[in-house]
Structures are given as C-alpha cells and as structure tokens.
Image (cartoon, rainbow, N blue to C red):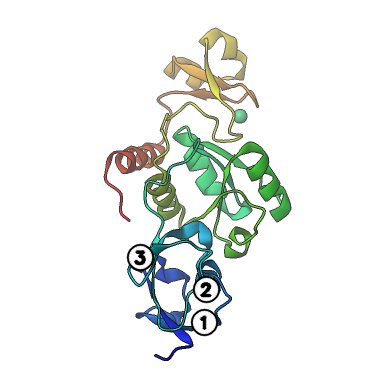
C-alpha cells in the first residue's frame, strides 16, 4: 500500500456487488483527496441504498468525508430489519411475481409491467414507496428518495429477501394479488352470478377487491400459495440474517 491508496474492506453481504476479481478480500482503492467515501463505495459497484455504517480506521464516518492515502475503510451492509416510515413498495417491471407474492401476504406492492424508469421513480417519490429493483443503475439515481436492491434471481429468494430486510407487517388474504387493491368481505348472495356451480357449492366465505372487483373465496388456495404464506410468516417471526 502507498499513500495514494486506501484499503477498503467490504462486508461479506455486499461482496456480490463487487467485480469478481475483488470479491476475495480487501481492495486497494486509489484516493485523490477529493472523492467522498460515498463516491468510492459507489465506484466499487455498491449502491448507496445497501450501505450501513462506514468506518475509517475504526471510527464511524459519513459518506461525505474524504478518505486519505493509508486509510483503512470498512463498509458495512445496511442493518436488518431496515426501518421504514411505512411499508409501501413499488416494484420494477422485472419483479411481477414478487409483487403478487407480497400482495398475497397483504403488503402494499404497486406494480405495472410497462412502467418506465422515470415513472417508477416518480411514483416512489410521490407516494413514499420504496423502489424495489435488481437494476443497480436505477438505485444510483439521485432523485430517488428510497430504494432497495432485491437479492436473488428466483421469486422465492426475492420474497424472503424483502421480508427479511423490511419485516413488513403481514396480513394474508387482505389484498388483491391482481391489482394491489384491498379486499372486503362480501356476502355469498352478492357474488353468486360470478361463481361457477362448483364454487357456489363448496365455499362459503368470499371477498371482493374494492378496486378491480375480482372475487376471491377462502379455502380455494392451492398448496403452493399456502406454502408462500407459511414462508412469509416464518420469515417475519425469525431473527434477521444480516
Ligand atoms: Zn383487484
């Protein structure tokens, strides 16, 4: 190491963001005396939304401070569960399955499969929703008030990651998986015209989406949906993983 380099030690949970050649251990990073810590961290590929504490030579430091040659910088991952003013989300276009799963357990998850980047940011800011995405470029946009990188390529992993990170309050079967609207109980007689005879005979408890009008009946859930809800409830009641 020389006096134009700092050593950056990245927490294990953040190493997936580093270039493959840098994942093994501490990285020597050139410092120019003008770049902020936040900039250095971001230039390694780590979105600032994923950042926890920063330590310089063992002392907590702000993202705005400037590392000097010879400094040892430790980069920690954001603490879980991450506190939110309210657990409301908007999901990027590639996260449709995750959106439906979050709705299934009652989490407010806005999603449109044709939303552009600007529209996503606008909705996140206007409605104070956390933007969930796997697009690191989107998380770098300075105008975005709050975002989070979703870990995992599979919806199962993504679902666990979001529940573990934010521990949102769960209320299964209260929200429409199709449109995110809230469900209201509805009398069987009121929905009779919408039901097939088999459904009419088998089920007694019904609810209807206040937004799109879709009718749901309880007890008709597949094993798969029950599994998804079980996973959510378990994740919500266990300790955090990072
Ligand atoms: Zn609906």
Q: Quick one: label 2 or label 3, which is nearer the N terminus? A: 2
Quarter of the picture holding the N terminus = bottom left
Residue 95: percent from left, percent from top: 56, 51
Residue shown at the point (27%, 43%) measured from the top left: 238
Mark 3 lies on residue: 59
- Give the secondary structure at mark 2: helix
Counting residues from the start of the chain, the first of labels 1 and 2 encountered is 1
- The mark closer to the camera, 2 or 3, is 3
Q: Determine contact: label 1, label 2, CB under 8 Å.
A: yes
Q: Disc 3 vs disc 1: Cβ atoms closer than 8 Å? A: no
- Nearest the eye: 212 or 80: 80
Circle 2 residue: 40
Whether 81 is drawn above or below 17: the answer is above
Q: Secondary structure at mark 3?
A: strand
> Dot 1 surroundings within 10 Å: few (below 14), some, or many (20 or more)?
many
Q: In the image, 194: left or right of 10? A: right
Q: Is residue 220 above or below residue 38?
A: above
Q: Quadrant of the C terminus?
A: bottom left
Ligand 1 quadrant in view? top right
SS class, disc 1:
loop
Q: Is residue 196 visible?
A: no
Name the residue carrying label 1. Answer: 31
Q: CA distance from mark 2 to mark 3?
A: 17 Å
């Amino acid at each position: 190491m020389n006096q134009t380099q700092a050593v950056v030690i990245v927490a294990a949970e953040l190493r997936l963001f580093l270039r493959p050649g840098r994942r093994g251990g501490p990285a020597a990073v050139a410092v120019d005396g003008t770049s902020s810590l936040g900039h250095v961290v971001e230039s390694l590929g780590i979105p600032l939304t994923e950042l926890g504490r920063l330590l310089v030579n063992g002392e907590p430091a702000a993202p705005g401070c400037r590392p000097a040659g010879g400094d040892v910088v430790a980069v920690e991952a954001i603490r879980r569960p991450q506190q939110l003013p309210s657990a409301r989300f908007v999901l990027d276009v590639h996260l449709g399955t995750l959106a439906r799963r979050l709705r299934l357990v009652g989490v407010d998850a806005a999603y449109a499969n044709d939303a552009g980047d600007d529209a996503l940011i606008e909705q996140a800011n206007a409605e104070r929703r956390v933007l969930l995405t796997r697009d690191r470029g989107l998380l770098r946009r300075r105008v975005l008030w709050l975002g989070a990188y979703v870990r995992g390529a599979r919806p199962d992993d993504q679902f666990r990651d979001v529940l573990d990170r934010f521990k949102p309050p769960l209320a299964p079967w209260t929200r429409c998986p199709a449109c995110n609207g809230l469900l209201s109980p509805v009398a069987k007689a009121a929905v009779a015209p919408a039901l097939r005879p088999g459904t009419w005979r088998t089920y007694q408890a019904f609810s209807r989406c206040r937004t799109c009008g879709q009718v749901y009946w309880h007890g008709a859930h597949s094993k798969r949906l029950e599994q998804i809800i079980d996973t959510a409830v378990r994740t919500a009641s266990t300790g955090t993983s990072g």
